[in-house]
Image (cartoon, rainbow, N blue to C red):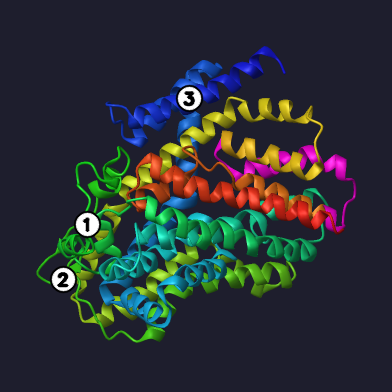
Amino acid sequence: MTGHAWLLLLTLAVAIGVLVLLINSRLRFHPFVALMAVSVGVALVAGLSTEEIAESLEKGAGGILGDVGITLAFGAMLGRLLANSGATERIARVIVDRAGTRSLPWYMAGAAFVIGIPMFFEIGLIVLLPLIFSVARRLQESGQVKGSPYVFLAAPTIAALCTLHGMVPPHPGPLIGVEGLHADLGTTILVGLVCAVPTIVLSGPVYGRWIAPRLAVHPDRELVAQFTGTTAETDSRAEKDSGTETDPGTGSGSGAGAGAARAGAGTADAGTGTAGGGSRAGGVPLGWALAAVLVPVVLMLLRTVAELALSEGSPLRHVLTFTGEPVVAMFAGFLFALFALGYRSGQPPEKVRESLTDSIKSVAGILLIIAGGGAFNQVLEDTGIGKAIESAATGAHLNLLLLGWLIALVLSFSTGSATVGIVAATGILGPMVGHGGGVESSLLVVAIGAGSIGLNYVNHAGFWLVKESFGMTLGQATKSHTAIQTLVSVCGLLMALLLSVFV
């Protein structure tokens, strides 16, 4: 470790501290502004030129918006169509009627598990948000859950999505590990699933049941109205009836970043009783409602199957690969919902378009914050902080599974990218594994993937997506999202270590 490497590590620690201070101090910086300011400061301290700083900011912000931004926009419009047509309410009603309150988190974990097989974390959460909000609102009205019903349902969803994303192929991170460590793909999928199930149970429904009564989390009323097809006034009355109303000036949605979702939220039309002025079709068939939700999921799942089962030259594989791209799949799902739910509802096309425009406004603030996180990530990568951490880790003498987990954990935390953590850990440990191919290599893939999930904090796009979507303060997001993903990380490692005893 050189003096410059230690300076980079110290810079990272100070940068995260300053970021938290700017957001939570009396200055109450908007998270996007705070992220950009800290990014520039880190780059200057690390010695990047002014040209390099500008390039890092543009590349980081543009890259994350290209990956997530368009998909998020389609997801917001799809959610509005589902809400205005009554589709999410219909699905929520079926789930609540068929599942008891105690079993609802298990149903949400199961739904997220299926959706999480082909989808990235952020995309899966976007798809499930309307369902979470609709079911949580019904629970809030019934008063059957102590604390926040949104955390009660979000915890198992977050746990299942991040576990699949980090530990189980065919997600890109685990696939990188499979290739770099010469592990068998089938064995790794099997081992990953064995480790994933108990991990999701402990980190999702179990932890969610414990933390929900301790967090007064209630998303922005306009955002809830958009996803549930109600008005903000109706949601406010529901909070009063359940005794969980929060003060708009000091409640969970009042953090410096939480206002982003509220600032651009589409207005609700009190006269029609729906978000964005749509008319709810309470009798929408359940089949149409489910189809509208599952179209993007099925397309992404078919892509996964095609990449595993079909040869590279197969025309069918090319078609399914294209239609299964996240942005294409979400676009297809939106178009299906537009014609099957939007126009069929009898609304004038002008009203449908106006409603969709409002839905984009409601996520504009979230998009800015995600862009700021992407810029911060890119600066951390370009300054060489990741390499400094690699240098420190290679001198450690630890169990191979623990070492791989630790390298991926620290690098993912420092760079804001789980993929960076997996790639670096795989590159460092690859020579130690040799040709691999056994169960040990598959367990190492799982351990590295588990490490990449932990300590998901302010420089991760997923952290800000969860925080702003649910109107959390920074502390609430840390106790829920960061804690859940860190629990997943630790449980995944423990499961890998436990299985290693028997192989």
- Dot 1, crowdedness within 10 Å: few (<14), some or many (≥20)? many
According to the image, label 1 marks what residue?
266
Q: Residue 426 lies in magenta, yes or no?
A: yes
Instruction: Specify whether 111 is left or right of 440.
Output: left
The kind of residue on which mark 2 rests is: Gly
What quarter of the picture does the N terminus occupy? Answer: top right
Pointers 3 and 1 in contact (C-beta within 8 Å): no
Place of residue 250 in the rendered image (x, y in percent of width and height, measured from the top left): 23, 41
Q: State which tag comes first along the sequence, 1 or 2.
A: 1
Place of residue 71 in the rendered image (x, y in percent of width and height, measured from the top left): 44, 57
- The structure residue drawn at horizontal position 35% and vertical position 42%, both measured from the top left corner, is 473
Q: Is residue 382 above or below residue 466?
A: above
Front one among 202 and 394 = 202
According to the image, label 2 marks what residue?
273
According to the image, label 3 marks what residue?
15
Q: Which residues are magenta?
A: 415-440
Alpha carbon separation for disc pair 1 and 2: 14 Å
Instruction: Specify whether 381 is left or right of 285.
Output: right
